[in-house]
């Protein structure tokens, strides 16, 4: 499980509860690893899966439980593209946590064009190994 120490860090909200915030910048239909900002040392990669508007996010560490994930799109142009959380994998295992983020317009997977002002913001609250995973 994650054992990363974040002393005197406001992202540590309680015993073994971690908050991670980062943004990734979609590049249209490119499947290359995407640029990141924020808590980038805690994110191994964000890669488009090959399906329109679908990305696999892999964290650097394993976590016992996902308490919350919030997604929000930032778009340069006024466009109705919404993010959606897909399946979460590896919670409660020794393998780094991963999950799917989908961007869609009216229920259809939609790629977001490459632009410095186009991003998906991710905020996560995770339970680390120090707490009871069933709580």
Image (cartoon, helix red, strand yellow):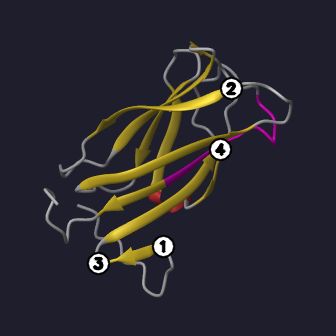
Place of residue 31 in the rendered image (x, y in percent of width and height, measured from the top left): 58, 24
Looking at the image, is mark 3 or mark 4 earlier in the sequence?
Answer: 3
Residue 42 lies, in percent from the top left, at 46, 59
116 displayed left or right of 92: right
Labelled pair 4, 2 in contact (Cβ < 8 Å): no
Residue that carries the numbered disc 4 in the rendered image: 35
Tell me if residue 45 comes above or below residue 101 in the rendering: below
Q: CA distance from mark 3 to mark 2?
A: 36 Å
According to the image, label 1 marks what residue? 11
Location of mark 3 (residue): 15
Identify the mark nearer the N-term, 4 or 2.
4
Q: Nearer the viewer, residue 81 or 117?
A: 81
Cα–Cα span, label 3 and label 4: 31 Å
Q: Nearer the viewer, residue 19 or 34?
A: 19
Could you tell me which secondary element the residue under label 1 belongs to?
loop
- Disc 4 packing (10 Å; few <14; some 14–19; many ≥20): some
Q: Position of residue 12 (x, y in %)?
A: 42, 76
Q: Are marks 1 and 2 in contact (CB under 8 Å)?
A: no
Which numbered disc, 4 or 1, marks the residue that appears first in the sequence? 1
Q: Which residues are magenta?
A: 114-123
Depth check, mark 4 against mark 2: the one in front is 2
Numbered disc 2: secondary structure: loop
| CA distance separating discs 3 and 1 | 11 Å
- Which corner quadrant of the image does residue 105 belong to? top right
Q: Residue at x 67, y 33 (%)?
A: 26
Q: Which mark is residue 81?
A: 2
């Amino acid at each position: 499980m994650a054992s990363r120490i974040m002393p005197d860090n406001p992202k540590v909200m309680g015993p073994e509860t971690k908050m991670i915030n980062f943004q990734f910048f979609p590049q249209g239909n490119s499947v290359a690893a995407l640029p990141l900002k924020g808590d980038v040392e805690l994110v191994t990669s964000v890669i488009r899966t090959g399906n329109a508007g679908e990305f696999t996010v892999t964290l650097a560490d394993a976590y016992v439980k996902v308490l919350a994930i919030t997604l929000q799109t930032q778009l340069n142009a006024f466009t109705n593209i919404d993010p959606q959380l897909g399946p979460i994998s590896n919670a409660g295992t020794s393998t780094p946590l991963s999950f799917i983020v989908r961007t869609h317009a009216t229920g259809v997977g939609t790629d977001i064009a490459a632009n410095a002002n186009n991003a998906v913001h991710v905020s996560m609250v995770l339970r680390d190994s120090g707490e009871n995973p069933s709580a």
